[in-house]
Image (tube, helix red, strand yellow):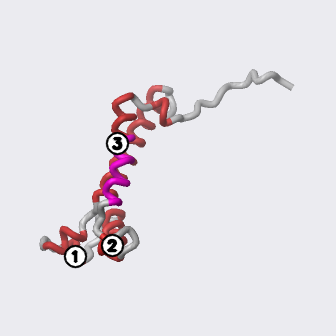
Amino acid sequence: MGKGKGQKVMDFDLATAMTKKENRKLTKMECMVNYHLARVPFWNGKESVAMANAEKCAAQPQSRCLPCAGRGPRARAHARSPPARTREMIASLKTKVKNRWEEQNGIY
């Protein structure tokens, strides 16, 4: 039996791969998701039909549902919610950090 003389596999750790600025941005964005969810009006709460429709439209930008197709007040109310936009920004920041880490470590 060997004493661990094999090659070490590189592990991606998000916390160590981020810069200070990215870490600050990520922390703030994660807090802003909860901030926006806490300030959603009761009639448009997290479990309401309107919030579910907004999340569904955020997940499928190519969908042509009627409220999203128009430009009236219903379209604005039906558009992506601030928490959904913030979650997209968090996901894009994490992929950017991972791609940079892979380039620096020669992993493609």
**Magenta region, main secondary structure:** helix
Label 3 secondary element: helix
**Does residue 95 lie above or below 66 as drawn?**
above
The answer to whether residue 106 is left or right of residue 57 is right
Pointer 2 local density, CA inside 10 Å: few below 14, some 14–19, many at least 20: some
Indicate which disc residue 53 carries.
2
Mark with earlier residue (3, 2): 3
Residue drawn where x is 36% and y is 74% of the image? 48
Q: Position of residue 59 (x, y in %)?
A: 36, 63
Q: Residues within 10 Å of mark 3 (few under 14, many from 20)?
A: few
Residue 70: x %, y % from top left: 16, 74
The numbered mark, 1 or 2, whose residue comes first in the sequence reads 2
Which residue carries the number 1 mark?
67
CB-based contact (under 8 Å), mark 3 and mark 2:
no
In the rendered image, the residue lying farthest to the right is 1
Residue 11: % across, % down:
58, 33
The residue stretch that appears in magenta: 27-38
Residue under numbered circle 3: 28
Q: Give the residue type that dot 2 points to.
A: Asn
Using the image, tell me which numbered label, if any, was put on residue 5. none
Marks 1/2 in contact by CB < 8 Å: the verdict is: yes
Residue for point 42% across, 32% down: 18
